Image (spheres, rainbow, N blue to C red):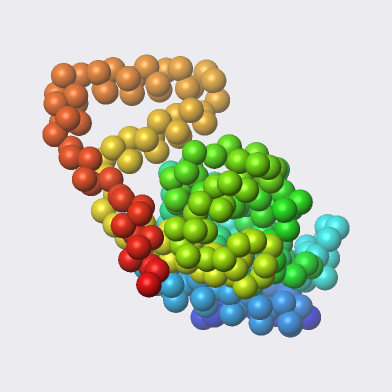
């Protein structure tokens, strides 16, 4: 076990305290970590930020590494990633709903290094990613967490109609065939080489999507989803206020003037990534 307060040169902070609550930059701390696992973590984060259009961040907050709870944490061989802070931008993992492209870009690269990645959709992981190396990197149709990731990128990055339920079925198999065909990646996805290729290109496309100008209509869609996620008593009043804004004549005119061409064309993007 070694003691660290940074990874790949990025200061490691803790923000799960009354005076440094979740979602803030917190304060830098030392964490115990198993050495081989630390090497994987360094390599993984280096690759994430080397590809990320925002570059290397100023701070990463973690909920913990060596933690007294069952599983890989008790060996210092698991990492909980709460949030990432760049100079002018922040990704708090809880904000998945309106930062899907950035979130899924990061996760795609994490998956190239960690056999276990538990995300926002996995029970009890809305506020952090859990990563560990207890199983090898590959795609297993029976894995709920891997299938959730797969369905999320098919839906939000590749814009396919698909149910996100973490269960591999006929629909998921069909959409994978279609998208892999467009990407010119061989199937099956259970072949490690094909899976790694998919992770890499998906990460790059997701990052490209964050860079492209996001249209006001896309932001309005995000806002609608955030409202749908609110507890019921708040949801009704916020939705009514939002609807009266949308129904206002000037808003309607403004929305009509926004050309659909601002919305991204996924097929064009895919083609720019394959030869
Ligand atoms: Zn964890």
Q: Residue at point 51% right, 51% down?
A: 178
Total labels: the figure holds: 0
Is residue 261 or residue 190 the one in the foreground?
190
Residue 245 visible, this angle: yes
User: Above or below — where is 22 with respect to 180?
Assistant: above
Locate the N terminus and report the quarter of the image it occupies: bottom right
Residue 103 in the image, given as x and y percentages of width and height: 49, 55
Residue 201 in the image, given as x and y percentages of width and height: 47, 66
Q: Residue at point 52% right, 59% down?
A: 180
Q: Residue at point 37% right, 72% down?
A: 275
Residue 114 visible, this angle: no
The part of the image, by quadrant, that contains residue 70 is bottom right
User: Above or below — where is 109 with respect to 120?
Assistant: below
User: Above or below — where is 25 with respect to 164?
Assistant: below
Is residue 202 or residue 187 the one in the foreground?
187
Residue 203 in the image, given as x and y percentages of width and height: 48, 64
Q: Residue at point 52% right, 66% down?
A: 185
């Amino acid at each position: 076990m070694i003691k660290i307060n940074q990874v790949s040169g990025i200061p490691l902070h803790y923000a799960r305290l009354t005076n440094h609550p979740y979602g803030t930059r917190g304060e830098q701390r030392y964490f115990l970590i198993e050495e081989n696992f630390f090497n994987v973590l360094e390599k993984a984060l280096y690759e994430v930020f080397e590809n990320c259009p925002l570059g290397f961040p100023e701070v990463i907050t973690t909920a913990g590494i060596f933690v007294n709870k069952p599983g890989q944490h008790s060996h210092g061989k698991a990492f909980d990633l709460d949030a990432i802070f760049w100079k002018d931008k922040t990704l708090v993992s809880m904000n998945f709903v309106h930062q899907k492209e950035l979130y899924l870009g990061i996760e795609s690269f994490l998956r190239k290094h960690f056999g276990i990645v538990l995300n926002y959709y996995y029970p009890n992981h809305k506020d952090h990613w859990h990563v560990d190396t207890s199983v090898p990197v590959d795609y297993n149709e029976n894995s709920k967490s891997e299938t959730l990731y797969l369905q999320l990128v098919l839906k939000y990055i590749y814009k396919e109609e698909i149910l996100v339920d973490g269960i591999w079925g006929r629909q998921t198999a069909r959409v994978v065939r279609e998208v892999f065909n467009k990407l010119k990646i061989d199937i099956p996805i259970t072949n490690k080489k094909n899976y790694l290729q998919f992770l890499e290109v998906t990460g790059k496309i997701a990052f490209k999507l964050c860079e492209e100008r996001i249209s006001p209509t896309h932001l309005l869609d995000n806002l609608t989803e955030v409202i749908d996620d609110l507890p019921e008593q708040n949801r009704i009043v916020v939705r009514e206020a939002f609807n009266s804004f949308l129904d206002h004549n000037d808003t309607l005119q403004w929305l009509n003037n926004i050309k659909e061409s601002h919305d991204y064309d996924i097929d064009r993007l895919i083609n720019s990534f394959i030869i």
